[in-house]
Image (tube, helix red, strand yellow):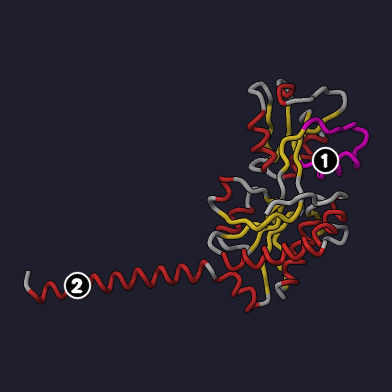
Amino acid sequence: MNIRRRGLLRRGLLLGMGAIAGQLAVGTSWAQAALENILKTKKIRIGVPTDFAPYGFVGPDLKPRGLDVDMANYIAAKLGAQAELLPVTTANRIPYLQTKKADLVISTLGKNPEREKVVDFSIAYSPFFIGVFGPKSIAIKAPADLAGKSIAVTRGSVDDTELTKIAPAAAEVRRFEDNNATISAFLAGQTQLLATSAQVASTVMSRNPQLGTEYKFLLKDSPNFIGLAKGEDALRARINEILADAKKSGELEKLSQKWLGRSTGDLPE
């Protein structure tokens, strides 16, 4: 190989390496851009539930209300930004983060190893308990008693994951696409039992006393975390600071008492 050709090859390699380095730098800059953009534009897009009282629902004035909605507005205020609240469902809340449609998701999001592979999480901000509920006329005390019974659950939720782990093969697990559909199926008698949060079940029981619904057994104690896109470390650090201060000042306790009627308990970091 002559000197001129070796020089051209070396130059090509250096240019190629420079281009790759530039792409990596741009990628890193983009991955860390959320907090900077929020502070610059004074706007933050937050996914919240609108079908999952008392965490998120539409009030008589057609505006979203609930613990997660209050949390979203609180976070926005602490960032000096205006909150753009985006209604999300169990099925699309993770994709909203992955596709950058939302900066944060505050929507009863539980943390597990599978989710941690695709999104990042803040420290916990509120309690969340899930269990199996049904009429007093059906004797259910443990997972084995679900055999031969039909249970409504929301597809892809933590409720679904935990129920699937313990449900015997003879149980009929019926999955619905959102929480309204799940609850409606149970209320309409399409299923005998309901797997959901204790808070949601409490609302169902108070509004439908004629059904005689009661708590059967615990599926999981699963606190809620705020979801962020992978790599947004600066935003996550700021959110964690806000939540830590809110926990210390008693703001998280106030929200829990207001919407859940119970203490936050010992929330994990």
The majority secondary structure of the magenta stretch comes to helix
- Side of 64 where 10 appears, left or right: left
Residue 10's label in the rendered image is 2
Q: Amino acid at mark 2?
A: Arg
* Residue drawn 49% across the image and 71% down it: 29
Q: Quadrant of the C terminus?
A: bottom right
Residue that sits furthest to the bottom in the current view: 40
Residue at which label 1 appears: 201
Earlier residue among tags 1 and 2: 2
Extent of the magenta region: 197-217
Q: Position of residue 43 (x, y in %)?
A: 68, 73
Amino acid at dot 1? Ala
Compared with 121, 199 (above or below) is above
Report crowding for label 1: few under 14, some 14 to 19, many 20 or more residues within 10 A (C-alpha): many
Give the residue displayed 73% in from the left and 73% down from the top: 82
Q: Residue at x 88, y 39 (%)?
A: 205
Q: Secondary structure at mark 1?
A: helix
